[in-house]
Amino acid sequence: MVRILLVEDEPAMATALRSVLVREGYVVDHVSGVALAREAARFGNSDLVLLDRTLADGDGLSIVSDLREYNPGVPIIVITALGGVTDRVTGLDKGADDYLAKPFAMEEMLARIRAVRRRPAGLHLRQIKLGRLAYDLDNDEASVSGKRLDLPRRELLVLGTLMRRRGRTVVRRSLEEAVYGFDDEIQSNTLDSHVSRLRRRLADATADVEIHAIRGVGYLIRQIS
């Protein structure tokens, strides 16, 4: 599953974009400004960013470096009413992978998304390995010793978030944001249930990794020594 961070402050446009993206099978996290997008970037779990420029609290281009710091190589498509040649050149020079001027057809946006995801990822680390476990960042797939590990979507999102920060503690809030999206209601013990089931699956597959609970903080994944 592909997770998209949508940075758009026009409610009607955000609703329309989210509806189209979800219908196409994407997981969408929506934020409405520069500050919120910078905060969302810290989770480092976006596979692509749709970034408006003319946000209420600043120019969306100002956070391109933040998005890439926390999620190296993440494709960024600027969507904006600033469609002049100079504006497009500025956006691309600032690090955007593509630049789409409003108004645009939804079909074109979807085609642009598919196109940038087909490109070589540059700095993007395509596969993370830990013990006998491998996690494919491009396709959001897990495998153990080369054999695909089939996981329910929520558990796969938990695993992907932990693997991106392997060896480090991931706070509960980051995991909850990764699993549920910003607009979902989160039950108090549901995350723990996902982690518990994921632990059993990894053990059954002899992945040679373990997930540790850090009381009152979150979880971390590491290789069994």
Image: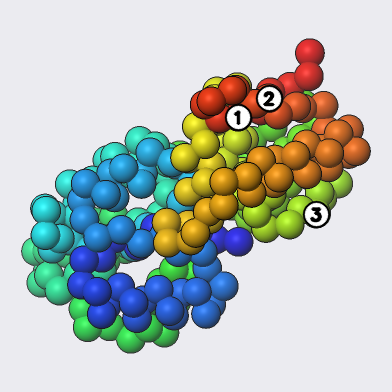
Left or right, 157 with reference to 66: right
Q: Secondary structure at mark 2?
A: strand
Instruction: Give amino acid for label 2.
Output: His
Locate the N terminus by quadrant: bottom right
In the displayed orientation, state which residue is furthest to the front.
188
Instruction: Give how far apart the Cα atoms at labels 1 and 3 are.
Output: 21 Å
Residue depicted at 53% across the width and 25% down the height: 216
- Residue identifier under label 1: 219
Q: Position of residue 134 (x, y in %)?
A: 72, 38
Residue depicted at 59% across the width and 23% down the height: 215
Q: Nearer the viewer, residue 150 or 99?
A: 150
Q: Is the Cβ of the residue at disc 2 closer than 8 Å to that at disc 1?
A: yes
Q: Is residue 81 above or below residue 46?
A: below
Identify the disc placed on residue 212.
2
Q: Secondary structure at mark 1?
A: strand
**Residue 108, visible in the rendered structure:** no
Residue depicted at 48% across the width and 61% down the height: 184
Q: Position of residue 218 (x, y in %)?
A: 56, 30
Q: Secondary structure at mark 3?
A: loop
Instruction: Give how far apart the Cα atoms at labels 2 and 1 are.
Output: 6 Å
Instruction: Give amino acid for label 1.
Output: Tyr
Left or right, 45 with reference to 85: right
Instruction: Give how far apart the Cα atoms at labels 3 and 2 are.
Output: 21 Å
Instruction: Give amino acid for label 3.
Output: Asp
Residue depth check, mark 1 versus mark 3: number of the one nearer the observer: 1
Colour setting: rainbow
- Residue identifier under label 3: 150
Q: Position of residue 4 (x, y in %)?
A: 44, 60
Q: Position of residue 27 (x, y in %)?
A: 51, 64
